[in-house]
Image (cartoon, grey):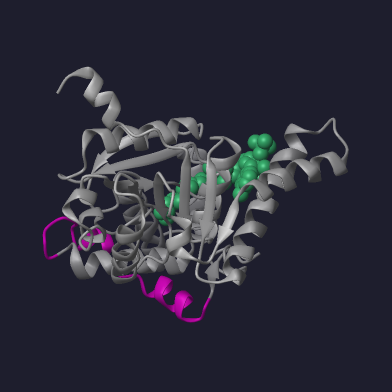
Amino acid sequence: RNFSTSLAAQKEVQNVTVFGAGLMGAGIAQVLAHKGGYNVTLADVSEKATAGGQSIISKSLTRIFKKSMADKSAEEQAEAVKKVVDSIKVSTDGAGAVKETDLVIEAIIENVGIKQELFKFLDGKAPKDAIFASNTSSLSIKDVAATISEERKALFGGFHAFNPVPQMKLIEIVKTDQTSKDAFESLTAVAKKMGKVPVSCVDSPGFIVNRLLVPYMLEAIRLVERGEATKEDVDTAMKLGAGYPMGPFELADLVGLDTLSHISSGWRDSRVSTGEISAEAVKESQLLESLVKEGKTGKKSGKGGFHPQ
Ligand code: 3HC
């Protein structure tokens, strides 16, 4: 392929539709609009959900502009927040939200069947050349893409952001064996335009960050369960001894104990028997499971966790 056809094939992304107005989807929409200058639509199933997303974005921008516009009045800061929030369209009409989209980023519930259903629906509604990406943190990108057409599979990849999205600099761009070079490069270009640093990974469990972080957090919890140290000392140790910004228990509260439990049980069920993950790395923790059962899931829910607020 010569240079000019390659350029023609690489899509220039202008309109981005984000599905899922939770913490991750809202964060991604915020940075796409505020830092990337994209035309962004944030879509979810209900107006309550999209309003929740707007509220997350508004709170985060308030925090950002309070610092970056410290010399300006509170009214001017509030106006700047409103300007960005208002620039992000919200939608509860999935088909309408992708009618003219160049890129769909999915950040809905971490359930492969529900994601497949959404992508199958969108495959029939979005322009033929629109790129599709999933923000899944633990599912196989190939599995998530299983229900879409072969043509779209070439335009499908992982686009994995980190919590808190406005603050964390990384995006993992994940390619399957079907992801085209052009789609991969378009996703990389979007991450860069958002002011993020992209890294590339194949479609393996947890990609890079969660592959390392999930077994690490689980081992920290089991270490405390075995009575070897207190959680406070483990957090202090990892902050002062390894230079991590948060200890593993603070991090588990941030990620959500429900999320940590969901990822690890998913891997126990589907990635251990395939040999992709060792049983030891994702061994169940009773302490984690009992906190989740009691609904004490951490910062997101505002309830419990290892360091209740
Ligand atoms: N929106 C906007 N700004 C935010 C923010 C948000 N949601 N959260 C934090 N900030 C900003 C603060 O305003 C502050 O800004 P400044 O640098 O201009 O002063 C800055 O971030 C630092 O915040 P704080 O002073 O309150 O606190 P810290 O210095 O402790 O930093 C932190 C907070 C950035 C969260 C830091 O502790 C950190 O990096 N922790 C590790 C987080 C991490 O590992 N995340 C990945 C989790 S794994 C994941 O997401 C994968 C998923 O798939 C499971």
| Horizontal relation, residue 18 to residue 78: left or right | left
Q: Residue at x 44, y 78 (%)?
A: 290
Q: Is residue 229 magenta?
A: no
Residue 54 or residue 292, whichever sits in front: 54
| Horizontal relation, residue 45 to residue 70: left or right | left
Residue 2 or residue 280, whichever sits in front: 2
Is residue 230 in view from this perspective? Answer: no
Whole-percent x and y of residue 123? 30, 58
Ligand 1, by image quadrant, is top right
Q: Is residue 278 magenta?
A: yes
Height in image: 254 above or below 2?
A: below
Q: Which residue is drawn at 68% across and 50% down?
A: 86
Whole-percent x and y of residue 91? 55, 61
Quarter containing the C terminus: bottom right
Whole-percent x and y of residue 207? 28, 47
| Horizontal relation, residue 67 to residue 74: left or right | left
Residue 218 or residue 4, whichever sits in front: 4
Name the quadrant containing residue 259: bottom left
Region in magenta? 273-295
Q: Residue furthest top?
A: 3
Name the quadrant containing residue 201: top left
